[in-house]
Amino acid sequence: MSRRALVTGAAAGLAAGIAAELVGAGFELVAITYRTTPPDRTLAAIRAAGAEATATRIDFLDDERTIASALDGLVRESGPFDTLVHAVGPLVVRRFERTTMAEYHEMFDGNVRSAVLCAHALLPSMRERGFGRLVFFGMNGASQTIPFTGFSLHQAAKSAVVAFARSLAMEEAGSGITVNVIEPGDIRQKSIDRARARELPAGTPRGRPGSYQDVADTVRFLVDADRDFITGAVIGVTGGLKGAAERNASDQ
């Protein structure tokens, strides 16, 4: 089966590493979206791994029609996609008393609305094909609404993403489409690989920081064609990190 994936927000960060790692799972084309960071490095990594690569500029904080139009054009030009890895998700860390309504819209438009718009754009062709894999990103503890100081808006938005994904998983299961969520832990150095991460200390129970490869491994597992019985799941990639005190959130 010819496979094509869309990875959003993959010009840098965790998503950049995930996009290149997907090639090893048998994808012939990996498309990415970017906002301001040039996508050249990610495109080169995907091509070096042996797949076609395309990049489309989409600002998921733009107005709804502009985003929907860009996604539709991307599907026409580079799709149909059988896999969506939706990694876009802006972050604001600030006590609620210091937040603004602009930041509220950034958190919910950038995290929740973006997920809904991507699903709207990609699901029709997946339903027609009878196969699809969607992976969304929460935040550590989002599925249980675990509170962290400074994360009121971000955690609320990520909890909404989890609720959306779980309901979508139930609705789409009969069409051969799985929908799952990954909750990364406190992965602050998003470009390091696992070998480098194992050399560094961190305040996780595992004793080391996470790496993009730790997250990419989970993505590859979930999007495999044989993973048709795992849907509606939330998987933490945290090194055992659970508590608010451990998270050591910035108190800004």
Image (cartoon, rainbow, N blue to C red):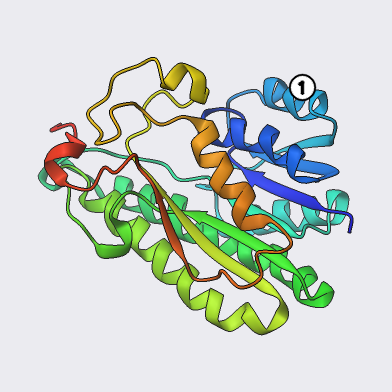
**203 displayed left or right of 10:** left
Q: How far across and how far down the image is residue 181, in percent?
A: 48, 59
**Whether residue 124 is situated above or below residue 35 in the rendered picture:** below
- Residue in the image at 83% along x and 59% along y: 80
Q: How far across and how far down the image is residue 207, in percent?
A: 28, 28
**167 displayed left or right of 35:** left
Q: Tag 1: residue type?
A: Ala
- Residue in the image at 50% along x and 37% along y: 214
In the rendered image, the quadrant that contains the N terminus is bottom right
Front residue of this view, candidates 227 and 248: 227
**77 displayed left or right of 192:** right
Quarter of the view holding residue 22: top right
Quarter of the view holding residue 103: top left
- Residue in the image at 35% along x and 40% along y: 91
**Whether residue 164 is situated above or below residue 97 in the rendered picture:** below
Identify the residue position indicated by label 1 in the image. 44
In the rendered image, the quadrant that contains the C terminus is top left
- Residue in the image at 71% along x and 64% along y: 226
Front residue of this view, candidates 159 and 223: 223
Q: How far across and how far down the image is residue 70, in percent?
A: 71, 51
Q: How far across and how far down the image is residue 59, in percent?
A: 57, 42
